Image (cartoon, rainbow, N blue to C red):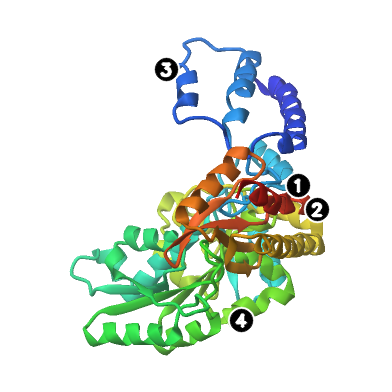
Amino acid sequence: MDHEDLRHWSKRAADWAAEYHAGLSDRPVRAPVQPGSVKAALPKTPPEAAESMEAIWADFEALVPGAMTHWQHPGFMAYFPANAAPASMLAEQVANAMAAQCMLWQTSPAATEMEEVMVGWLRDALGLAPHFSGTIHDSATTATLSAILTMRERTLDWAGNEDGLSGQPRLRIYASAETHSSVDKAVRIAGIGQANLVKVPTGADHAMEVEALDSAIRADLAVGHRPAGVVICAGGTSIGAFDRVGESLTVAKTHNLMTHVDAAWAGSAMICPEFRALWDGVDGADSIVFNPHKWLGAQFDCAVQFLADPAPQVRTLGLRPDYLETLGQSEITNFNEWTVPLGRRFRALKLWFVLRAYGLEGLRTRVRNHVAWAEEACAALEALPGVEITTRPSLSLFSFALRNGDAATEALLQRLNDDGRVYLTQTRHEGRFVIRVSVGGWSTTRDAVMLLPRLVEDFA
């Protein structure tokens, strides 16, 4: 296959994509396949000779779409959304065509400088203070790891990078149980250890109790441990819990601890001024992460980390050997020094396309619709006999269960997902098996959301 072939097949792929999205409602959301079925259909060895694109394409159509869970389906209300606005898809096509490795300014000046500007656009769109700068990661997991590593090094006066962790004080990180598992993963990878992630109790509102946070820090100081940082939850994955951000930041600052706000999902909603009270005080944070790929239409992967001062993170993660120097430009921004990977994709391009193609008002309208439809679906479910709303909508996320127990709720979830018109996932809340409803897909409609209470009424 050469570039002339690519011209033909790119057009064919674009036609296929349009037909695929137009017909998504006719497909089951979740792939109706058994584990191992795709693997069994693939040859066990690679071909010795080149095969025609006709044959490859035919096999793609036969094997792949029917064995995929369709994240862009209007009935996808599982996990959190992974949006893909058409403008984002177009940007990814041209970024893929250029195939740049954007690790340094000199390897891709437009990518670096557009990233700086897009972070500024999003900072202003979310109503954050102008002192924040930032960078684009692949996912919130990487952003959180970067923040945890920086907490570690800041606390150890950067001795961990130089000398290793052996013999260092026992570091402690604080978060509530509502924070994402990426925090747990980060403390493991950073060498801090799971046992040193202190899960602070939450109150009736599912927010971290600030008095308990302060007490935990003081208790650790009393026995010689070294508190290193606080991770604050702004829209937790399980039920959408929010810590009291400003109060938590005040406690952390009292003890001179670095702070990271995980707003991976809910941060997108802050383009709507009426929701910003949910993270009141956030301008005092050292680090904030949110994922435009979850709710703003930017295709996965695209996670933005805002930093009040990038210097500690660059000092932690930056490494500039001779072969990565930009000659004559010692102070140039090289975003690989702000994160873990050296290699970087041109992620800013899809943000530029999306923000221009839909505008902030268009994106706000989508978020507001999703929140309103979640409230409406929640009310309709609550009116059904035998259904209990276990957590009320936090933005566009809520949970429910059947009153007659976990087994019945789990069976209902299985029936809903097997039906194929919606896809939902579960969590455990206060010891109960509950069903999460997460509204936020780019192609989601009110009709698709309101189908859920009708299905529950039928199946339950």
Chain-order first, disc 4 or disc 3: 3
In the rendered structure, are the residues bearing label 2 and label 1 in contact, judged by CB atoms less than 8 Å apart?
yes
Q: Which residue is mark 1?
A: 87
Per the image, label 2 sits on a secondary structure element best described as helix
Chain-order first, disc 4 or disc 2: 4
Q: Residues within 10 Å of mark 4 (few under 14, many from 20)?
A: few
Q: Residue at x 77, y 54 (%)?
A: 446
Amino acid type of the residue tagged 2 in the rendering: Ala
Chain-order first, disc 4 or disc 1: 1
Amino acid type of the residue tagged 1 in the rendering: Ala
| Residue 364: quadrant of the picture | bottom right
Where residue 166 sits in the image (x, y, percent)? Answer: 19, 65
Camera-side mark, 1 or 3: 3
Q: Is residue 160 above or below residue 223?
A: above
Camera-side mark, 3 or 2: 3
Q: Which residue is mark 2?
A: 357
Per the model, the C-alpha gap separating discs 4 and 3 is 55 Å
Residue 445 visible: yes
Per the model, the C-alpha gap separating discs 4 and 1 is 32 Å
Q: Residue at x 53, y 81 (%)?
A: 244
Q: Residues within 10 Å of mark 3 (few under 14, many from 20)?
A: few
Q: Which residue is mark 3?
A: 44
